[in-house]
Amino acid sequence: MKKAAMAALLPLSALIYSYAEETFDVRQHVCTATRYDVAKDIPGNWSLPSSIPDTCTPIHLNLVARHGTRAPTKKKLKELNDLATRIEVLLQDTKEQKLATQKVPAWFWGWKSPWKGKLAGGELIKEGEEELYNLGIRTRDKFPQLFNEDYHPDVYLIKATEIPRASASAVAFGMGLFSGRGNLGPGCDRAFAVSSESCATDIMLRFHDCCHNYKAFLKKQEPTVDKLKEPILDEITDKLRRRYELNFTRQDIYSLWYLCKQEASLLNKTDQACALFTPSEVSLLAWTDDLQLFMLEGYGNALNYRMGVPLLQDVVQSMEQAIKAKEEGLAPGTYEKARMRFAHAETLVPFSCLLGLFLEGSDFEKIRKEQPLELPPKPPQRRNWRGSVVAPFAGNDMLVLYSCPDNSSTKYFVQVLHNEHPVPIPGCGNSDVCPYEVFMSSLGSEIIGSDIFGDQHLKRIIRRSNSRCKANVAEKSSIWYKKNALLWVDRAEL
Ligand SMILES: *[C@@H]1O[C@H](CO)[C@@H](O)[C@H](O)[C@H]1NC(C)=O
Ligand SMILES: *[C@@H]1O[C@H](CO)[C@@H](O)[C@H](O)[C@H]1NC(C)=O
Ligand SMILES: *[C@@H]1O[C@H](CO)[C@@H](O)[C@H](O)[C@H]1NC(C)=O
Ligand SMILES: *[C@@H]1O[C@H](CO)[C@@H](O)[C@H](O)[C@H]1NC(C)=O
């Protein structure tokens, strides 16, 4: 009763704001540090209800997944230790100047990094293991027709990058996928193969690491991105200085935002570093992270995603082989049913861009015309490009190839799932299900060539990305060329 009377006195806008605050879950706004379970169910129109007809059967699955939740990297461990020192200095200054300390957040006193003393970082942690393990189980449950066969490495191909958190993610996924199917231990586990390329030559899954020109681009672009973020950071630094009466620097705010992301994601703790910021400040900080992701890994520069063409090629090739196997009526166990890859945000983000995911309005047409895109709009405007959806821990794209009863000319369909939800494919009228031929041409004439089967354009594009993307030394680049040449030969033979 009393509450209602109070509320009646408040202006309507305040009511809406407090409602927004109540439902604001900071764990959904921590960009690429977002946990998969949180990210998977972030609402928004980035996903659609599935429209695949019941009469269709999945015949092949391609998966591209990011590794699961990991510990902070070594560099970040140091940044957090430095933050503890900085906080001490700030408190000391306040005491020396005999300033009031009642506004200082209580946890600042004596705060130490939760990872203090930890020397090595970056590994997959137990939460990350669970993300991938459960994804493996859900994938098998969702596609029983694909995972009903005995394990054979040619039927279920599992690849990971050489980075331990990615290969450990592949293992966690496989343990879920094949759980109960073997003879090992009480869980009836079974062994399975995970293959990796050396980092230096992994053009499918770690292209960002073997692309010399991309590294040069990053170096050049980083100051531009910082410039873009600075005004927002400065504004928030200023607000926090006044709110807590501490002389924060911009770097302090960067570090506190980083701490908030780690606490929210790794420790499920939102009432400490995250509570320093208001929801609207968190939204702005998340936006600055998203701008960085957009410019350095996403649509902000064509090189970012053109590097992913060999990976897309690999996906296309696996679908073509699956169709061929179906057409020829090969015996079960003699052809591949799933190709599953475990890598990094730097792999998943460009791959999603090649598929045209998370574009706004007329962006797809702009990309086709090679026009630059606008940056993702600033909050409170809504945007599709959100790091927490695009590439959370264990974030993934699945391309499911379906065979449908042959009552017309279209027999094969592709459905794209992002974080397990069907997503609109811009090249396919924003439907989640696309006739195979339409899907192939939707991959963007400018990226893959509308003459995907004819291939002249495709060869030109690959040649172009090769010359843009020279590997570091002669030996590596010869492997790079050989691989692409092999892809062409395979395609020409089809
Ligand atoms: C998603 O919703 C926003 C408004 O919230 C709208 O501008 C946008 O066009 C929608 N996108 C799709 C693909 O429906
Ligand atoms: C705050 O710190 C800056 C340098 O980081 C210094 O120039 C300034 O004098 C300090 N202000 C107060 C009130 O201590
Ligand atoms: C995280 O904390 C919230 C409460 O703040 C709780 O509801 C949720 O179950 C926790 N999640 C995990 C994974 O512990
Ligand atoms: C083919 O199947 C679709 C439903 O999947 C149906 O709408 C259509 O009428 C069918 N066409 C023919 C020629 O039977």
Image: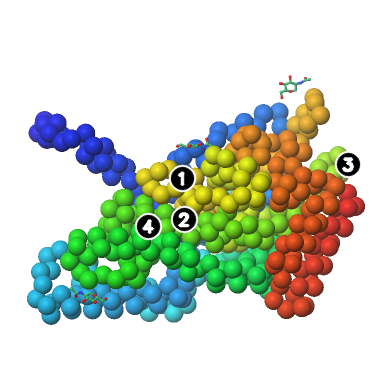
- Which of the 4 quarters of the picture holds residue 477? bottom right
Which mark is on residue 285?
Answer: 4
Quadrant of the frame with the N terminus: top left
| Marks 1 and 2 in Cβ contact (< 8 Å) | yes
Q: Residue at x 79, y 53 (%)?
A: 458
Residue 98 percent across, percent down from the top left: 9, 76
**Mark with earlier residue (4, 1):** 4
Q: Is residue 193 left or right of residue 304?
A: right
Q: Which residue is mark 3?
A: 328
Q: Which residue is mark 2?
A: 290
Q: Which residue is mark 1?
A: 383
Residue 120 percent across, percent down from the top left: 47, 77
Q: Is residue 105 left or right of residue 296?
A: left
| Closer to us: 20 or 180 | 20
**Mark with earlier residue (4, 3):** 4
Measure the alpha-carbon separation of dots 4 and 3: 54 Å
Measure the alpha-carbon separation of dots 4 and 1: 14 Å
Front tag of 3 and 2: 2
Q: Secondary structure at mark 4?
A: helix
**Local crowd size for mark 3, using a 10 Å CA cut-off: few (<14), some (14–19), many (≥20):** few
**Mark with earlier residue (1, 2):** 2
**Local crowd size for mark 4, using a 10 Å CA cut-off: few (<14), some (14–19), many (≥20):** many
**Mark with earlier residue (3, 2):** 2
